[in-house]
Image (spheres, grey):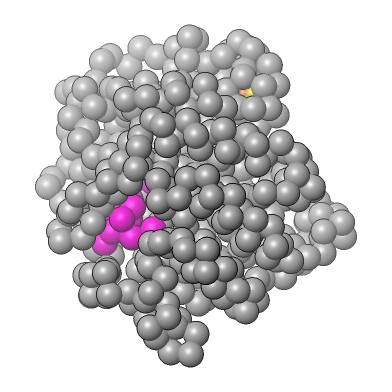
Amino acid sequence: MGSGPSPFALHPAARRGGDAKGRGIPPCCLPPVSRMLPTGGAARGGEASVAQFLPPASRTAGGPVSLVPESCGLCPRACGANRAAGERGACGADGDLVVARAALHFWEEPPISGSAGSGTVFFAHCPLHCLYCQNAPLAQGRAGRPVSVERLAAMCLELAGQGALNVNFVTPTHYAPQVRAAVALARQAGLRVPVVWNTGGYETPEAVRANAGVVDVYLTDFKYADAGLAARYSQAPDYAQVALAALDAMVGQVGVPAFDEVDGQPRMVRGVVVRHLVLPGALEDSKRVVRLVHGRFGDKVRLSLMNQYTPVLSAAAQAGDAWAQGVLRRCPELARTVPDGEYEELLDFADELGVQDYFWQEGGAAEESFIPPFDLTGV
Ligand code: SF4
């Protein structure tokens, strides 16, 4: 994996101002491309000194028992697993807090990644388990190792010490109490950057409300409008209604998007970005998602329309993975990429609907190089 500039661009007007398709033209409201190049992870401002601030390492991996539920209802699955006793829930998580990577990440939306990078912490397991998951080794728990809450707090401080624009927790839903405890410790120890909650959108309103005062920015998916698609790919036919209720709570909590400036570039410090990944053969559902989210929230959220769907199942099936082969027999459409024309049609639809300042992706985003290695870096 190399560190390239963010594949996202902002504002539909820039798309219309380029070549025939308007692709690859840097939007006028973004900084020059040279300002968007990554720093290569160079530390700025010195290393954070963690140990002197943190309380004695008296907790075991997974944190104190009170942070790990005895009958889990942290996500809408509400499967009731006794994780405190080591039982695994439907998400795959047990009593351990498992992290696979903590590093600067340069491929989020520009005001999240900037040129300095987003301090991204990738957690193992996931409440959704989408068949086409782009981070399958992570979601399936094949990557990562248990850490303590103190170690997670230390990672946050180390990422800030490397110059991260924020701390960005990727799918923290099933570890929410431990993550909030780690943020509290890190803030006590001097963490000042915004906290980003990067989620699949499958959250309960209660879970979102518990983040009040902890989370600054929600980077949340809105995957499907259609219950059939949500059932087919994620076994979550209630996805749309759940995600809408969660969005209501998120917007109510952090408000409209707000930005400050770091090194001459805008950084998002409050607000909600709603991501939608266009799936092969599902253009009409993507339009429904855009209409639904824009109709309900308008400019209160920023939409991010993504064309980086990568048919990772195909590679797995070709390598002999029997599960991937079975999925592709049932859902052969997941072996395709999304044609440029379909993505363009969705962007045109958003333009015609009057969506302002949404993020979109330049051509060639559908590459596995945008999927980071879950190799315990920074853990
Ligand atoms: S977070 Fe995991 S263990 Fe908890 S309710 Fe959801 S699926 Fe079950």
The answer to whether 7 is drawn above or below residue 303 in the figure is: below
Q: Position of residue 130 (x, y in %)?
A: 68, 47
* Magenta span includes 278: no
Side of 252 where 293 appears, left or right? right
Q: Quadrant of residue 341?
A: bottom right
Q: Is residue 105 visible?
A: yes
**Highlighted magenta segment, given as a residue range:** 109-122
Q: Position of residue 177 (x, y in %)?
A: 45, 21
Q: Is residue 325 visible?
A: no
Q: Nearer the viewer, residue 86 or 30?
A: 30
Quarter of the image that includes the N terminus: bottom left
Quarter of the image that includes the C terminus: top left
Q: Position of residue 17 (x, y in %)?
A: 38, 83
* Magenta span includes 113: yes
* Residue shown at 45% from the left, 50% from the top: 298
Side of 167 where 287 appears, left or right? right
Q: Nearer the viewer, residue 193 or 259?
A: 259
* Residue shown at 20% from the left, 43% from the top: 161
Q: How many marks?
A: 0
Q: Residue furthest bottom?
A: 20
Q: Position of residue 37 (x, y in %)?
A: 27, 69
Q: Quadrant of residue 155?
A: top left
Quadrant for ligand 1? top right
The answer to whether 209 is drawn above or below residue 372 in the figure is: above
* Residue shown at 73% from the left, 49% from the top: 226
* Residue shown at 37% from the left, 66% from the top: 10
The answer to whether 63 is drawn above or below residue 337 in the figure is: above
